[in-house]
Amino acid sequence: AQSVTQLGSHVSVSEGALVLLRCNYSSSVPPYLFWYVQYPNQGLQLLLKYTTGATLVKGINGFEAEFKKSETSFHLTKPSAHMSDAAEYFCAVHPTQGGSEKLVFGKGTKLTVNP
Amino acid sequence: DSGVTQTPKHLITATGQRVTLRCSPRSGDLSVYWYQQSLDQGLQFLIQYYNGEERAKGNILERFSAQQFPDLHSELNLSSLELGDSALYFCASSVDGGASNEKLFFGSGTQLSVL
């Protein structure tokens, strides 16, 4: 079965600093990859996704992620953190081949942005 | 606003009781998903319906059941509730539900507290 590992359940950065949230997946065949964000008291919303093509994917709010097949990773980055980025971020995978397995989420990384 | 509506927002009940959570998908979306979010398990996929039929099943307990009605709204029924069922239950919808790269739209969730 597919699994997703997000390294670090909590990440704290200063406003204006680089944001790096790590995600690794386990699969011999690269799955489709997603990052979702959950703001306090809200549901999840899609930040970006990778399916095929260019491995660097740009999403909303200045975030981007790079798919690295050799490292089975899909880390999320933003050059300069803003206070409004404080939220919980979830990496998710969906297998590209067979089965009824649906979107599988990592356990999430809570991002704190300090003034 | 994702367009997915979940009611109620909060539910407090006692062990052994039965509750029903309701979800209205985005207009035009045929597929509804249910997820459970807890601190220890993270986001767990429970079940998916497409146009009234069950399409995929995840880690859903036998005490839980769901259905999707002709108007496409869905209900998740939780019975013989236990303390461990306390969690945030999310509903999500998508246009089709058959494509691996499809974007899900999440509701704001129902916070269930079992006392």
Image (cartoon, rainbow, N blue to C red):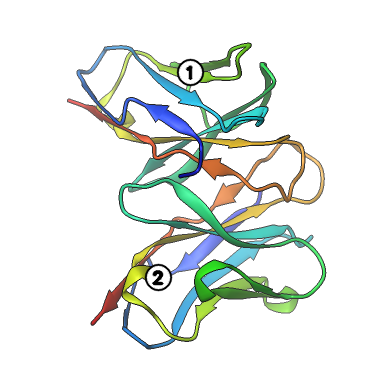
Q: Which amino acid type is shown beneath numbered disc 2?
A: Gly
Q: Looking at this view, is B9 or A50 the one in front? A: B9
Q: In this view, does A62 lie above or below B18?
A: below
Which residue bears the numbered disc 1?
A: B75
Residue at the (37%, 13%) spot, across then down: B79
Residue B4, numbered circle: none
Which residue bears the numbered disc 2?
A: A8
Q: Mark 1 lies on which chain?
A: B
Give how far apart the Cα atoms at labels 1 and 2 are.
34 Å
Q: Relative to B59, is A83 on the left or the right?
A: left
Of discs 1 and 2, which sits in the foreground?
1
* Image-quadrant location for residue B87: top left
Question: Residue most toward the left?
Answer: B115
Q: Which chain carries label 2?
A: A
- Are discs 1 and 2 less than 8 Å apart at CB? no
Disc count in the image? Answer: 2
Residue at the (73%, 51%) spot, across then down: B101
Q: Which amino acid type is shown beneath numbered disc 1?
A: Glu
Do the residues indicated by labels 1 and 2 lie within the same chain of the protein? no
Q: Relative to A83, is B4 on the left or the right?
A: right
Packing grade of label 1 (10 A; few <14, some 14-19, many >=20) is many
Question: Where in the figure is residue B102, as x and y percent of width and height?
Answer: 70, 47
Label 1 secondary element:
strand
Label 2 secondary element:
loop
Residue at the (66%, 30%) spot, across then down: B28
Q: Looking at this view, is B64 or A81 the one in front? A: A81
Question: Where in the figure is residue B61, as x and y percent of width and height?
Answer: 47, 23
In the picture, the quarter occupied by the C terminus of chain A is bottom left
